[in-house]
Image (cartoon, helix red, strand yellow):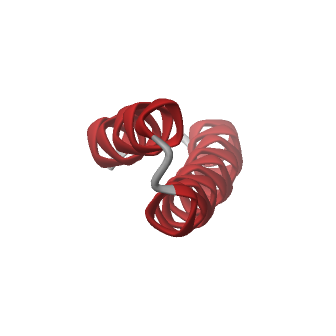
Amino acid sequence: MLRWALIFAIIAIVAGLLGFTGIAAGAAAVAKTIFFVFLGLVVVFILLGVTIAKKL
């Protein structure tokens, strides 16, 4: 998932440099969304790991 966020971020940077601002804005929005979903999942799994580790 983090790989896709990085790919979309690179697409946004390249499109921005070439002047395709609409495509750059769309790719940046997708990259930001995927990144925050990834961060949310990381936090959830860390919390689950800590709570399950305490039970064992």
Quadrant housing residue 25: bottom right
Q: Which quadrant holds residue 50?
A: top right
Horizontal and vertical percent position of residue 55:
63, 48
Q: Which residue occupies the foreground of this view, 12 or 1?
A: 12
Left or right of 24 on screen, residue 4 = left
Measured as percent of width and height from the top left, residue 47 is found at: 71, 48
Identify the residue at horizontal 44%, vertical 64% (top origin): 23
Compared with 20, 6 (above or below) is above
Q: 23 or 28: which is nearer to us?
A: 23
Marker count (numbered): 0
Q: Position of residue 3 (x, y in %)?
A: 28, 36
Figure quadrant of the C terminus: top right
In this view, the residue farthest toward the front is 19
Drawn side of residue 28 relative to residue 20, left or right? right
50 horizontally vs 6: left or right: right
Please provide percent x and percent y for residue 45: 55, 50
Please report the residue visible at 49 percent of the width from the left and 30 percent of the height from the top. Answer: 17
**Residue placed most toward the observer, 5 or 50:** 5
Please tell me which residue is depicted at 63% across the width and 55% down the height of the picture.
Answer: 32
Identify which residue, 14 or 54, lies in the foreground: 14
